[in-house]
Amino acid sequence: MLSFDPEKIALPRGHYINGEQRTDGGSRFEVRRPSDGRTAGELAEANASLVDEAVKAADRAVKESGWASCPPRQRGAVLRRWADLIQADTRLPLLEALGSTRPIYDVIHHEIPFTAEAIRFYAECADKYSGDLLPTRDASLGMLIPEPYGVIGAITPWNFPLSMASWKCGPALAAGNAVVLKPSELTPYSTVRFAELAAEAGLPAGVLNIVQGSGAVTGSALVAHPLVRKVSFTGSTLTGARIMSDAAHHGMKPVTLELGGKSPQLVFDDAGDVAEVAGRILRGFTANGGQACVAGTRLIVQRGIAEALIDSLIALCQGFQPGVTWDENSRYAPLIDRRQAAKVQQVIEAAVRQGGEILTGGKRFENTGEGYFWQPTLLASVAADSPAVQDEIFGPVLTVQVFDTEEEGLALASHPTYGLCAGVHTKNLDRALRAIRGIAAGTVWVNRYGRSGDFIIPTGGFHGSGIGKDLGRQAFEACQRYKSVLIDF
């Protein structure tokens, strides 16, 4: 049985600094469960003083624990033990499901294995990528030597708390850095347990620290701290721009930013079986209740297949049933909170006022109390400048636009702000390759939609969707700075 009683789960009480849980800090804030809106607990926000303590603990750990200077395979061994503990722990999935939008079934079968495997991938990277011996004169030796930055500040979002933490911590720790991580104040609990398991695996105290609080207070203090040498952030484009600016003004520190998206699903007449394509499209915009930066929320479909595909999608959308995340039968995620539900509703209403048509959905599921479960929604007849087309909604809302020619479809697939992901659905290889070239996005999936377990494939956006890459060797190498050396002999 995967189901559990959320009232019987002991919750972490605060921060995790220098190997210990801490309950002190500034003002207190409530944490609510997305499934029913009830208060799960209350935490003290990490103010600038507590962030300073966490960063200094991380800086001492880098210098004194031997983590940065030990053989890379030794770091890899600790990370592999950590991954095994993540996969075996019985408490971690309960904390993730209780406090986030992730149903316990998905946490057990997807989130936990994905998180553990990400850590294993970076354990393997620890001794696989090195510097370079560079050509120069016979009597000289040129080298490029990688070194860890020291302390990396990481800020993760609420939509996939554990896997996002693994994306930040895995490469940073494998490269020999210490990390101070701020999870979202909406989903704080599982990340503390994640850090405790790292300590059980042998990670020295202070090498991984968790500080709880808002972006305005805790996040800002972390980005601005002079001992934080690099910042990695996943979240909205607006917040990413602020972090980039703050990082530049407080030490000129580099940033990795995975930001928002408004990704197209470009479907051509020759895409193949309509039911199969509809299933792909559906998963692309309803997974986690549509609350994913990579969500494929713009259906751009060629006229010959449009009617059949839309009819199939409408039927599929009507098959969802809401359920609390601690019920093993639940497969559909709630929206994170009341504010997010209000945003989804406002965008839909604005689209309708401009002439948009709701083909299905368009409102909350009934009889779900204070849990904000939104019906999968299809919006047709939307103008190109509609907020439903232009804005990242972060809800299960799919706009529908129809095109005739390939050139028209590619034009509709472009976006003035975002360039994170895109889906292309066609059986014609030439057309697929033209679309790959023609769409400005950091990731293009062809005849699929969504990431795989191939951690070697990096992810990251163009334009307002971000800078740098998560996953892949690129993320590991971005956690190192490179020193040029020239020796005469």
Image (cartoon, helix red, strand yellow):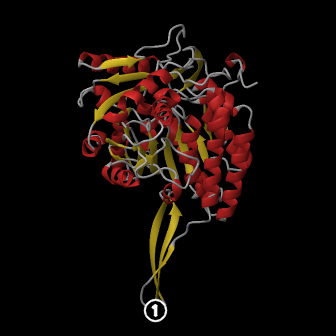
Examine the rendered structure and indicate whether residue 53 appears above or below residue 401.
Answer: below
Marks counted in the figure total 1
- Residue with the mark numbered 1: 139
> In which quarter of the view is residue 175 placed?
bottom right
Q: Is residue 21 visible?
A: no
Pick whichever, 343 or 400, lies toward us: 400
**How far across and down, in percent of the image, does residue 264 sit?**
36, 38
483 vs 320, left or right, is: left
Q: Residue at x 62, y 22 (%)?
A: 330
89 vs 250, left or right, is: right
**How far across and down, in percent of the image, does residue 42 sit?**
58, 20
Q: Residue at x 52, y 51 (%)?
A: 471
Q: Is residue 163 visible?
A: yes
Q: Residue at x 42, y 24 (%)?
A: 311
* Residue type pointed to by label 1: Ala
| Crowd class of label 1 (few under 14; some 14 to 19; many from 20; radius 10 Å) | few
Pick whichever, 74 or 344, lies toward us: 344
> In which quarter of the view is residue 7 placed?
top right
Examine the rendered structure and indicate whether residue 379 appears above or below residue 183.
Answer: above
**How far across and down, in percent of the image, does residue 51 sit?**
51, 39
Disc 1, SS: loop
Pick whichever, 450 or 326, lies toward us: 450
220 vs 109, left or right, is: left
On the rendered image, what quadrant is the N terminus found in?
top right
Examine the rendered structure and indicate whether residue 476 appears above or below residue 317.
Answer: below
